Each structure stands twice: as C-alpha cells, then as structure tokens.
Amino acid sequence: MTQYPLPNNAADLTGDIAFVTGASSGLGRRFAQVIAASGATVVVTARRKAKLDQLVEEITAAGGRAVAIEMDVTDADSIFAAYQSAVDQVGVPTILINNAGIPDAQYATKMSVELIDSVIGTNLRGPFILASEFARRLIAEKRGGRIVNVASMAAFRYDGHGAALYSITKAAVVRMTAALSVEWARFNINVNAIAPGMFASEMMDGMLERMGDLAARTPRKRIGQPAQMDSTLLFLISPASEAVTGTTVQIDDGQSAK
Ligand SMILES: NC(=O)c1ccc[n+]([C@@H]2O[C@H](COP(=O)([O-])OP(=O)(O)OC[C@H]3O[C@@H](n4cnc5c(N)ncnc54)[C@H](OP(=O)(O)O)[C@@H]3O)[C@@H](O)[C@H]2O)c1
C-alpha cells in the first residue's frame, strides 16, 4: 500500500506551473494570487494586458513568480500561441485553471447570433480547446496534472431572468469536467470543477446593477468573497486530492439550497 504523510493534506505547489485564464479581474485574479502564494509559478492570461502586468507586479512583490500573457479565449490561435509562450517562458504548465467566462444577461429570444457565439466561445469552446492542449502536452511528456474548470451554480438551476445560454454553457462545463476526467484519468490528469454561487467580481457588479440587491435574497444576506474559495481551489490542485477527479464542488454559501 502506498504510504502517505499523516495527515495527507499538503498544499505545497513548489515546482508546479499554473496557467490561469481570466486572471485580469474577479475570481481569476484571486486564484492566481493564491496559487502563487502556495509556491507555483503562475501564468496569468486575459485580454487586458495592463491589468495582468499589475497583477504580476503584486505577485512578484509578495515573493511569488508570475508572467502575464495576453490571450483571447474565443480565438483558438490566440490560445495556442499563449500556451506555447507560457511553455517557452516558464515551462510546461501542470495546473490549468479554466476560469475566463462571460454572462449573457439576455433572454434567449433577444440574443444576437454574435452574442450566442461569444458566450459559447468564451464559456465552453475556449476552455475545451485549452484543456485539450494542456493535456496533449502532459500526455506526450508522460506527466500528470490538474485542471479546475470554473462552472457556476447556474449549471444546475435557472431563475428565468435572462441567462439561459449561460446556464447551458455552465452545465456543459460540468459535463466536460466529468467526461475529460474519464479520458485522462489513466494519464494522471485530474479534472474537477468549482461551481460558485454569487461572489464579488466585475461580473457580479454587472448583475447587481441589473437585478438589484441580490444579497438580500440569500440565506446569509451576503455576496461571497473570492477568498472564501481559496481552500477548495488549493484542495483540488494539491497532492492531497490525488484520488478526486470528475467532480464539481459547489460553493454557494447556501444560496441555492434556499
Ligand atoms: N462572480 C460570480 O458570482 C460567479 C458565479 C458563478 C460563476 N462564475 C464564473 O467565474 C468565472 C470568473 O468570473 P468573475 O465573476 O470573476 O468575472 P469577471 O471579474 O468579469 O472576470 C472574468 C474574466 O474573464 C476574462 N475574459 C472574458 N472574456 C475573455 C476572453 N474572450 N478571452 C480571455 N479572457 C476573457 C476577463 O478578462 P479580460 O476582459 O481582460 O479578457 C476576466 O478576467 C467565470 O467563468 C464566471 O462564469 C462567477
């Protein structure tokens, strides 16, 4: 039987290289900081390069290691180029946080084809292309890795107020997580997801503007803070969760059980 330390809860990511999408704001920004603080080198990606550069400065000032790479997740060539640039600059990524995402904020019948393509491209097509590129390289090098996809509680329920396609893409992310975990288990690439409820971010600012005081409708009368997801994120990418794959962890402060 394999021997594990007692307790087997190490979250030391020294030697890992993490590729984080949507790191220019909100949850992705926090995810990148947390992973860097745990010892990994972090590749922060998004379209707004100035915000990424600022994040790299902060991580570096705190003693971490990070590089910023501009990437549009709706553009496959941009994904391949950013991934290759990461490999060239810091080495082969061993952790992928597929976090970039956009809301639709619209009823299905009112959506333009451009908006439909953009929501599917950002929330599903891009993450699938990137996850496959990430795994392709690790499989070729016979190395394991960790993927965390950021889904949403909207994958499981929808209140009917203009986010049907968002809900559909996030349900697909949950299924993508399970399906890819099956395909890549034998290569020691674990694929899990986090499904957040309502957490403070730029996206949430937009929702609050559109829908009013959403905190008042929650059991704890609050919107979550990204830091409240730190421990779950670390669990899913650390050695301690080696046998956990194909799972979506719901973190919603009890919001949707109400
Ligand atoms: N906040 C919540 O309550 C909540 C709840 C459930 C799920 N989520 C999910 O959490 C993830 C992060 O969202 P957030 O709440 O942190 O919102 P956010 O602050 O708006 O962050 C979204 C991130 O995605 C990036 N992004 C958007 N389109 C992109 C594109 N085409 N190419 C590359 N990057 C792109 C943005 O960067 P650029 O604009 O610089 O490209 C930004 O960094 C999303 O997948 C979202 O669906 C959030």
Image (spheres, rainbow, N blue to C red):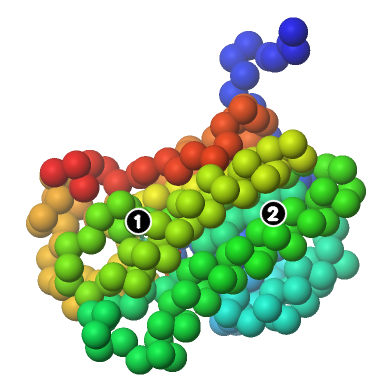
Circle 2: residue type: Ala
Q: Quadrant of the N terminus?
A: top right
Circle 1: residue type: Ala
Disc 2 secondary structure class: strand
Q: For residue 127, what is the image quadrant?
A: bottom right
Residue farthest along the left direction in this orientation: 216
In the figure, is residue 124 to the left or right of 37? left
Residue at the image point whose x is 56% and y is 71% from the top: 125
Q: Which residue is mark 1?
A: 155
Q: Position of residue 60 (x, y in %)?
A: 69, 60
Q: Nearer the viewer, residue 255 or 15?
A: 255
Q: Which residue is mark 2?
A: 18
Residue farthest along the top direction in this orientation: 1
Residue at the image point whose x is 45% and y is 43% from the top: 248
Q: For residue 191, what is the image quadrant?
A: top right
In the figure, is residue 240 to the left or right of 105? right
Alpha-carbon neighbours of circle 1 within 10 Å: few (<14), some, or many (≥20)? many
